[in-house]
Image (cartoon, rainbow, N blue to C red):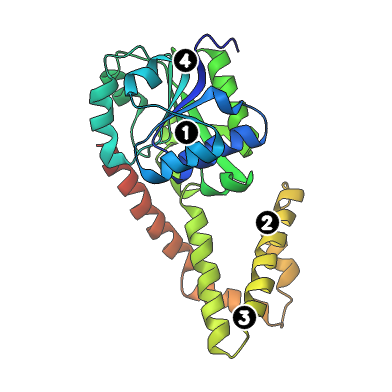
Amino acid sequence: MKITRKYTLGIIGLGHMGTAIARGAVRKEYIERYKIAVYDHSEHAKNDCRIEGFDNLSSLKELVENSHIVLLAVRPQQVEEVLDEIKDYDIHTLLSIVTGVSIQHLQSRLNNAPIIRSMPNTPLQINEGATALCKSENCKADDYDFVFQLFATMGVTKTVKEEQMEDIVAVHGSTPAYIYYFVQCILEDAKKRGIDEDVARSLLVQTVIGSGKLLQKYADKPLDDFIDEVCSEGGTTIEAVKQFKKDNLETIVHDANEKCIARAKQLGK
């Protein structure tokens, strides 16, 4: 991809995800530090920019019109205010990670600028992220490929249809919190049984890591087979799984996802 502007990546909002993307890009030497600019007046952003060597600009216009890819990484509640401010600027390509905001809406506010929508997750911080992407019809293939590979340096990246972007939040966007909560529940139960918290957490975290690596290594293997390998007939684990099924864990997950997806769609309105 031929970069024609001063900055390769200009970031509006240096929160958790904006920071993770910026740091991942330079950690993998995909983008050089001096090619990243930030617009965020918070003290933590100013401090991070000093530490990381990113340019922290005082003008949104300067950032937008000097950046090849503009990353919109603000909260959904801040989107309209930012769009109002940048709508008349010369945007080369906008990359949005804001949940629920459609390509159509972004283009209607930004003079049909090329748009890439992204749904990353927080494990990007350690290059173990998962990211879903889609693009507008007028987005150049080279620009999309550049963004696709940017996220690919930090984990797994997949292209999806835009109409699936709200639903897919419940596949990988929000699910780190589900996993952390499940881990928390098991850990709290272990503590109630008198098990040392540090011992339980170490064993539990490694179990989550190991189980994930097995799923990754044998990607074509049916999930039921993994379950059956642990659930010996007449053994202990099968009793726990039977209880999960009796309590309709699948329905609980479905209902939770419905709430999550409904909120994503609400934010988009």
| Earlier residue among tags 1 and 4 | 1
| Earlier residue among tags 1 and 2 | 1
Mark 1 nearby-residue class (10 Å; few <14, some 14–19, many ≥20): many
Residue 100 vertical position relative to residue 92 in the rendered view, above or below: below
The quarter of the rendered structure image containing the C terminus is top left
Disc 3, SS: helix
Q: Which mark is residue 118?
A: 1
Disc 1 from disc 3: Cα separation: 40 Å
Q: What residue lies at 53% left-to-right and 42% top-to-bottom?
A: 20
Disc 2 from disc 4: Cα separation: 35 Å
Disc 2 from disc 3: Cα separation: 22 Å
Query: Label 3, on which residue?
Result: 239
Mark 3 nearby-residue class (10 Å; few <14, some 14–19, many ≥20): some
Q: Which of 114 and 244 is in front in this view?
A: 114
Is residue 167 shown to the viewer in this render?
Answer: no
Location of residue 188 in the rendering, given as x and y in whole percent from the top left corner: 52, 79
Query: Label 2, on which residue?
Result: 212
Is residue 206 shown to the viewer in this render?
Answer: yes
